[in-house]
Image (spheres, rainbow, N blue to C red):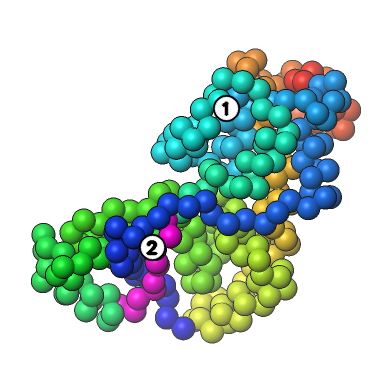
Amino acid sequence: LKNVIVTMDFVPSRAALQEVAAQGKAITGPQEKMLRRAFTGPDGNTTGTISAAELKEVLRAVDVDVDGEEGDKLFQTMPELRSRPVTFDELKQLLEQRLYYRIQAGRFYVVLSLFEAECMRAVMHQQIHLPLIPGKDTAVALRTERITLDSTYGYQPAQGFQDSTAQSCFRFIDSQLNYQPREVSLVLRALQENELEKRYNFFVEVSSNRRRKQKDPATSALSKVFITADEHHMLNYKIAAGRITAMLKGRGMYPRDCFAAIDRDRDGLLNYDDLKRGLDWLGLK
């Protein structure tokens, strides 16, 4: 099989682009119970709230660019989230509706062979500073991973979530094994409608047809994609991680400072009791 080198970002009509929320799976009963555990307040009350600062860290933990364009648009549509505590039901609705994951319907991504890319670029150069198709508002860009090689008149890239998801999925199709944690999350969200076994079998089968040293993907950074059914199975951990981050920031502490504070016997290790007391001290049970 040929490697995935050049991809095309194709917009048939810029005027027809429509921004929508990415589709996701509903949260099941057992998953909701897990989320409530991560949402538990210091008094053990699962009907409590989290602060706006904690919400930002939770959203950051689920890969939302809260300090960038994605975060700005989310808080513009729900400005009240900036100034008041958020209940569990509100957070659950936010996670299910995926209002923070915006994509453009009418935008397509295509893998090109080097010959196809060469021909496409020649056509694009014939229409420099002009519409690619006379009388139409079609836009195209040729890319290699995050680098834009060329683009037509009027082209505008997609938002970060859609763009990064496409790039991460192309790396999966290309049988690559090295991923950053956010890239693993993006691939998992894209594949969560597929069964675990089918994901693994597809990856191994495609990889076996490439002229590369064969490695077991289950031992790589990609392993979570083959053992985690959907994104909600990771939310319990990510919400807790986001809340802990917010609590550390509220105390003006770095993680190493917190570690030193709750390591009672100063042996450089945390046992169960140390960790439990530390989380209680931070305000998370």
Crowd class of label 2 (few under 14; some 14 to 19; many from 20; radius 10 Å)? many
Judged from the image, the secondary structure of the residue bearing numbered disc 1 is helix
N-term mark: 2 or 1: 1
Q: Residue 81 got which mark?
A: 1
- The magenta-colored residue range is 104-114
| In-image side of 251 versus 19 (left or right) | right
Kind of element beneath mark 2: loop
Q: Residue 126 at what x, y percent from top left?
A: 10, 71
**Quarter location, residue 177:** bottom right
In the picture, which quadrant includes the C terminus? Answer: top right
Q: On screen, 126 above or below 235?
A: below
The image quarter in which residue 99 lies: top right
* Residue name at image x 26 percent, y 63 percent: 139
Would you say residue 94 is visible in this rendering? Answer: yes
Judged left or right of residue 163, residue 113 is left
Q: Nearer the viewer, residue 44 or 149?
A: 44
